[in-house]
Amino acid sequence: MQRTLSIIKPDGVKKNLIGEVISRFEKNGLRIAALKKIKLTKEQAQGFYIVHKDKPFYHSLTNFMSEGPIVVMVIEGEDAINKVRKIMGATNPSMAEPGTIRRDFADDVERNIVHGSDKLETAMTEIPFFFSEIEIF
Ligand code: DAT
Ligand code: MG
């Protein structure tokens, strides 16, 4: 059993895709262990994406991530990290497999609807960024 952090980004929330994204996770045998709707400040978005601080897209990405509410979730299940990444599809929606969330709904490489932790160490820092242990079931 594994836990991962997923985010429905501001574009996903605006496009009314909260139910669609959750449904795709649940239909693939994953469980929602924690969930909340919040809005990040620019500083909080910068903190979450600190690993990308030297990338040319950091400023634009963190503006986007703080432009509107997001839904943050802890997803639980067998091989949850890889499963969520597979259901999301490649970062760039034009490279994502048909039937993935990003291929089906994303506008471009930045506004790509969902986030999912990329590996175990990342999940273990991203989950406590948003949730305390007593909020996860
Ligand atoms: P992922 O979200 O698939 O883990 P990542 O960690 O490499 O991708 O990048 C984090 C986010 O940054 C990504 O979801 C969208 C944005 N991003 C990545 N590469 C980008 C690029 N070349 N131009 C603009 N935004 C980019
Ligand atoms: Mg990533």
Image: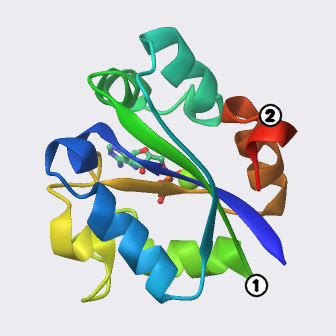
Question: Which-is-in-front pick, marks 1 and 2?
Answer: 2
Element on which disc 2 rests: loop
Q: Is residue 81 left or right of residue 85?
A: right
Q: Position of residue 69 (x, y in %)?
A: 33, 29
Amino acid type of the residue that numbered disc 2 sits on in the rendered structure: Ser
Which quadrant holds residue 58?
top left
The vertical placement of 122 against 4, above or below, is: above
Residue nearer the viewer, 41 or 27:
27
Q: Label 2, on which residue?
A: 132
Residue 7 in sight from this viewpoint: yes
Residue nearer the viewer, 93 or 136:
136
- Residue drawn at the location 39% of the way across and 63% of the way down: 91
Q: Position of residue 119 (x, y in %)?
A: 74, 63
Element on which disc 1 rests: loop
Q: Position of residue 21 (x, y in %)?
A: 35, 66
First of labels 1, 2 by sequence position: 1
- Residue drawn at the location 78% of the way across and 36% of the way down: 128
- Residue drawn at the location 23% of the way across and 58% of the way down: 17
- Residue drawn at the location 84% of the way across and 78% of the way down: 1
The vertical placement of 98 against 124, above or below, is: below
The crowding category of the residue bearing disc 2, from other C-alpha atoms within 10 Å (few below 14, some 14 to 19, many at least 20), is: few
Proximity of marks 1 and 2: CB atoms separated by less than 8 Å: no
Q: Position of residue 108 (x, y in %)?
A: 19, 55
Q: Report the coloring of the rendering.
A: rainbow
Amino acid type of the residue that numbered disc 1 sits on in the rendered structure: Glu
The vertical placement of 61 against 80, above or below, is: above
Q: Is residue 122 left or right of residue 56?
A: right
Give how far apart the Cα atoms at labels 1 and 2 are: 22 Å
Residue 89 in sight from this viewpoint: no
- In the rendered image, which quarter contains the C terminus? bottom right
Q: Label 1, on which residue?
A: 78
